[in-house]
Image: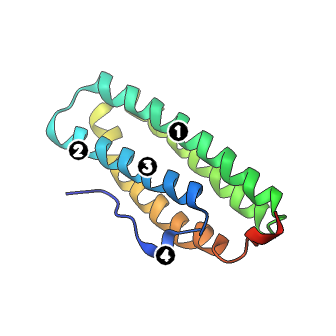
Amino acid sequence: MTLLTWEPEYSVGIEGVDFEHREMIEMLNALYEETRHRMDPDAIDQFLGEIHATISAHFALEECVMRKFDYDEYEAHKDDHEELLDQIRELMDIFARDPEGGVSLLRERLSAWFSVHFSTFDSRLHGKLDMSRH
């Protein structure tokens, strides 16, 4: 069983960005599996740190692409990125205090947030960035 599944509507039409989206989904699914089969708080805590770092780097790339193409929804998209990073940091803090509750909240929030973000903010990028201009 997986937490998230890549859907074609999540594509932004930029190979590198879409590749990283798929990698993030794989990381989140691997974390989900880790929490289902064994509850090793140290491993999960380390995984959360890796996910935060990976997602931060990905958002920096995506925001660079949006600026390069003068994307008209850049500010709202960037704000949504910052909201997710804040949520991940909050989940890391909750997990540190209460591993069981933190894992449950992690499953609920990340799955919902990424599904919504991919299908709204990221899917609107598709077709709006004119790759031939650069």
Mark positioned earlier in the residue sequence (1 or 4)? 4
Amino acid carrying label 1: it is: Thr
Above or below — where is 83 with respect to 77? above
Mark 4 or mark 3: which comes first in sequence? 4
| Residue 97 visible in rendering | no
Marks 4 and 3 sit apart, C-alpha to C-alpha, by 16 Å
Residue 23 badge: 3
Do residues under tags 3 and 1 come within 8 Å of each other at their CB atoms? yes
Kind of residue at badge 4: Glu
- Secondary element type, mark 3: helix
> Which of the labelled discs sits on residue 33, or is there none?
2
For label 1, the SS is helix
Lateral position of residue 10 relative to residue 122, left or right: left
* Residue linked to disc 4: 9
Q: Residue at x 30, y 56 (%)?
A: 3
Q: Quadrant of residue 45?
A: top left
* Residue beneath disc 1: 54
Q: Mark 2 and mark 1 in contact (Cβ < 8 Å)? A: no
Residue at image x 16%, y 33%?
38
Residue 113 shows up from this direction:
yes
